Amino acid sequence: MARYIGAIDQGTTSTRFILFDDSGNLLTSHQLEHRQYFPNPGWVEHDGEEIWRNTVSTIEETLLKMKANASEIMAIGITNQRETIIPFNPKTGEIYHRAIVWQDLRGSEIIDSLKKSVDEEWLRKKTGLLFSPYFSGSKIRWLLDNIDGLREKAERGECVFGTIDCFLLYKLTGKIFTDVTNASRYMLMNINTLSWDSELCDMLSIPMKALPEIVPSIGRVYGECTLFGSSIPVCGILGDQQAALFGQACFESGEAKCTYGTGCFMLENTGEKLCLSKHGLISTVAYQIEGEKPVYALEGSIAVAGSLVQWVRDNLKLVKNARELDELAMSVSDCGGVYIVPAFAGLFAPYWRSDARGVIAGLTGYADRRHLCRAVLEATAFQAYDIFEAMAKDSGISLSSLKVDGGLTNSSPLMAFQSDLLGIPVIRPKVIETTALGAAYAAGLSIGIWQNRKNLSRYWKEQLRWTPGMDENVRSEKIARWSKAVSRTLDWEKEKD
């Protein structure tokens, strides 16, 4: 009988289930998109029940494609969009409100108020984070303040505020846990002790009993799933970006990866050392293996990357698909002086400006849709450059290459331009679904399919490499114009008193 490791990859725009073999090879998968809700400007929501239905369907369809039985799955790992919060009843599973998505800005006023009364350096030392509506804490506070009866339910133990991993684990097994990587994104966990912090919870007036139990990412079976006719261990949980770091085999301090998906996220492993940023990055838990000390990472987060391509396709109707955008971008030698800063939900790292809004700068009569398409791709590379520079300053490590993954790495002009901007090779692995692969690795390690991380390192294989070739003067000029364009986005929305 064949034996597989399954990974649920629940992302911002879709849910996938992927089967891997015991050598880390991707065998087959199925993917379903879910609806995005935008009830107000700056608000983004998902339907938790739709996500759950899609999760079940992707598992069933993947098994059908593989002509396999559930009994052949040795374990299921979970990786998920982080910071997104679902309030649900831990006894009945009733969902009290649609999921508030990581991109959502409705907590901005709560954060602005905290900034006036709480020292941000105190927060950074406690959590590794900065004040931002990006993290889960302000989303939870908003729900408590605005949904009738929810605070009373939370105080009675009738509501859990779970990230998507917690919600899916509950639906699969009836258990309620979240792992340390997801917990580190709540703005409520002490990053030194890996436990919920009473001072942080009091700061946001959130009942601690409404939070799930925090567990290690790897090394424990959280529960058994019996929904598909067999008892399958569910083990191994990693937030999506930490999962990609793990799937890229960045196990040593100083190794880094960048994921180009709906957003763009660069993480650098800093080992067991908690490195607090002074240049606009955040510190997060990379992973924890049961019985071992946690491994930390520096992270730079970009809200809009692949979603900018979707916006150009769906809202502007400029192209029919990503391939057409690439072709148009490659048909010109440069952006024609056009720079796009996609601050749709403010600017994340290293600026952290929720008052910023997007701009298209440098337009002249010369520019046409080809230049706009090229500027769309270059916007992601410029944002990643800003994080790369901040990371080098914080860690003191100059990377000699950058591992990349995610859907946008299929864009050759983007990856080539990224290499030019960074001045180092950009390397894509053979398996680019590294987020799901990281969850599969975590699940396999938990039940002994692999004995240690060294076993996994040998599975990483390079597929493509882009090397820099841009003239230094041209590079410097482009970076200067990008910085000028970023400055045009600031102070668009005024902070409210």
Image: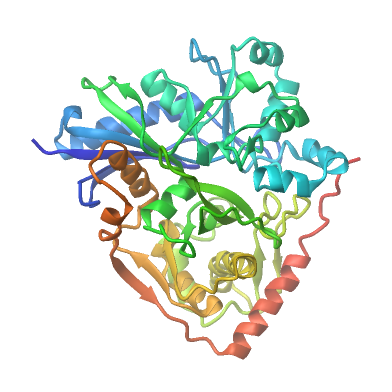
The answer to whether any part of residue 269 appears in the image is yes
- Farthest residue, direction left: 1
User: Residue 234: x and y, percent?
Assistant: 33, 30
Check the image and tell me how it is coloured. rainbow
User: Residue 388: x and y, percent?
Assistant: 58, 68
Q: Look at the image and tell me in which quarter the C terminus lies.
A: top right
Label total for image: 0
Q: As rendered, which of 43 and 89 lies closer to the eye?
A: 89
Res 72 quadrant in image: top left
**Residue 341 shown left or right of residue 449 in the figure:** right
Res 6 quadrant in image: top left
- Farthest residue, direction right: 497
**Residue 21 shown left or right of residue 34 in the figure:** left
**Residue drawn at (57%, 55%), measured in percent from left and top?**
299
Against 46, residue 459 (above or below) is below
Q: Look at the image and tell me in which quarter the N terminus lies.
A: top left
User: Residue 490: x and y, percent?
Assistant: 79, 59
The answer to whether any part of residue 316 appears in the image is no
**Residue drawn at (70%, 19%), measured in percent from left and top?**
147
Against 420, residue 491 (above or below) is above
User: Residue 210: x and y, percent?
Assistant: 61, 20
Against 39, residue 404 (above or below) is below
**Residue 213 shown left or right of residue 437 in the figure:** right
**Residue drawn at (55%, 57%), measured in percent from left and top?**
305
Q: As rendered, which of 266 and 489 lies closer to the eye?
A: 266
Q: As rendered, which of 75 and 309 lies closer to the eye?
A: 75
**Residue 106 shown left or right of residue 336 in the figure:** right
